Amino acid sequence: MVTVAFSPDGQLIASGATDNTIKLWDTKGNLQQTLKGHLGVVTRVVFSPDGQTLASVSEDGTLKLWDREGKVQITLEENGDAIWDLSFSPDGKRIASVGEDNTIKLWSRDGKLQATLTGHTRPVWGVAFSPDGKTIASASADGTVKLWNADGSLRNTLTGHSDEVLTVTFSPDGQMLASGSKDNSIQLWDLKGTPLSRLQSHQESVWRVAFSPDNQTLVSASADNTIKLWSRDGLLLESFKGHGDDVYDVAFSPDGQTFVSASSDNTIRLWQPEKNFTTFLRGHRKAVETIDFSTTLEQIASAGRGGVIRIWDFDGHLQRTLQGHQSRVTDVEFSPDGQMVASSSFDNTVKLWNLDKQEKIILKGHQKRVQSIEFSPNGEMLASSSSDNTIKLWNLNGTLRTTLIGHEGAVTTLDFSPDSQTLVSGGWDGKVKLWSTNWSKVETISGHDGSINNVAFSPDGQTIASASDDKTVKLWNLDGTLKTTLKGHKNEVKVVQFNANGNFLVTAGNNLKLWTKEGTLLGSVALYAPVREVVFSPQGQSLAIAYLNHVIVLRDVEQLLDMNGMLTYGCDWIKDYLSSNPTLSESDRQLCEPN
């Protein structure tokens, strides 16, 4: 399969292939019709805006217009050179085609050649009309994108790719242009030709890029056999694997809920990227290291390697940013009353931000990077831990209470007991330590074979959980005796957190696991990128996941725990395959049917 397109009403999918045919399918994968007429590979199919005409181009050097019944209305013959792409104007009255002869040709709907645009020095691979019809963009093997006025005059030449440019498209709002190249990258441009973002994750040529109808995401198809979903600002959101060869084309459905891909593995696949399981918080330009929920306000704080703290509402809207750290932010915490945010950084400082007065207090005293911070639940103090092997306790006016010394390496994680009377810490020395009785008494818990990445008290204060580089999580009694060891992670465990009522806990590294408080595994959830932190919302209804690829995701806990819901979700993805694949047995077709 070489090319694929949705009809404007979302009811049909057209595909073109190396067998010189066009096939029309319904969205369940049932073949409706096969159109024959081309004498070469069908390189592109596109529906007209009104959905009444299907246009196709081919290596045979022709452009054909087909009606809804599959009959050829017009055949436009050029000079015999292969045609690689075409695009309808928004009003459907003009068609642009490009190909091996280095030109862009503009045709009327009735097949009359209106203009030939010259300027590219090598074959032209891609073409697109802007949503207002006033601009035409072309992508060429000469490594450039050219912007043309509707009358055919050249407006601008965009340079930035280091190899052939294979595809070009406009965002539906007409504010942005995306191009994909043999240099394995996607370039986002404004309409003046200014580069906005360079998207790099594909390992081979990018054959096609397409924006979602709501302008918020774009999808790319590549010779590396993958499809990638990106945010509008250039953040990689998800990678989709499944094709066994080059993915040549990809297109969103009109409602934006699915997209379809065509591959040289001879398959067409339908994909559903989110399905209401997630909310994305987009805005960080570098890895997100830390997140926290406010217990009193519906707000989320996040920060990371960019040094900027961002405050969001629960719907994922950015409310404000806090700037002042000179290096990456390692931890961020709301005060129990929600009026302050504390942050720690590689710049050796802790900052207390008063959200109402927009003031901050800088806490200085650590000699090396500050790794972690934690407010006491009673709101009377703040604890900080550092690579200088110490823990410091501060009053909220910024004065130092005391310094705790005992770890033999960087102290990376802290948590207070619910009654604020005990502090648990962990670090590079692989030890868990309990500090109590005016912080002069310390107990050491040993058992891990690697650094401690996270510690947490259960909500009732009777259990301590620790996550380690040794790929395990351990649950401890307060006297330091081991309750149980949670095994199953294949890599280091970065996170352990209890939910609000302590009935279960979550652990995370390269995947996410949910456990009962006794240590029984409830289930595992695949993650599309490594994570740094996972936090429950105050009521335990949501999980906020901080990914190292700049993205924060909110996931519904009930849906994660509801295995019937997860089964329904999975079956929604494959039900069309089960109903239409001719190679399946009847028993296989019933896999998702209720008992």
Image (tube, helix red, strand yellow):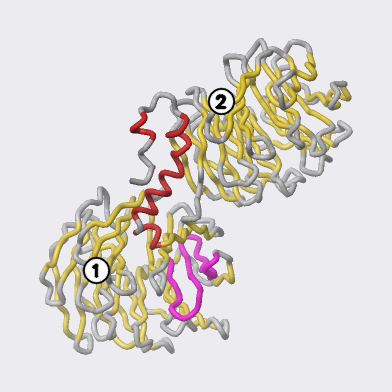
Q: In which quarter of the image is the N terminus?
A: top right
Image coordinates for residue 443, horizontal then vertical, percent: 14, 77
Residue at 33% from the left image edge and 70% from the top image edge: 499
526 or 49: nearer the viewer = 49
Q: Name the residue under label 2.
A: 31
Q: Nearer the viewer, mark 2 or mark 1?
A: 2
Q: In which quarter of the image is residue 182?
A: top right
Residue at 22% from the left image edge and 60% from the top image edge: 473
Kind of residue indicated by mark 2: Leu
SS at badge 1? strand
Neighbourhood count class around disc 1 (C-alpha, 10 Å): few under 14, some 14–19, many 20 upward: many
Kind of residue indicated by mark 1: Gly
Q: In which quarter of the image is residue 402?
A: bottom left
In the rendered image, is residue 162 in sight?
no
Q: Is residue 19 left or right of residue 505?
A: right
* Span colored in magenta: 289-315
218 or 350: nearer the viewer = 218
Residue at 86% from the left image edge and 23% from the top image edge: 110
Residue at 43% from the left image edge and 49% from the top image edge: 569
Image coordinates for residue 132, horizontal then vertical, percent: 81, 44
- How many labels sit on residues? 2
Q: Is residue 412 left or right of residue 154?
A: left
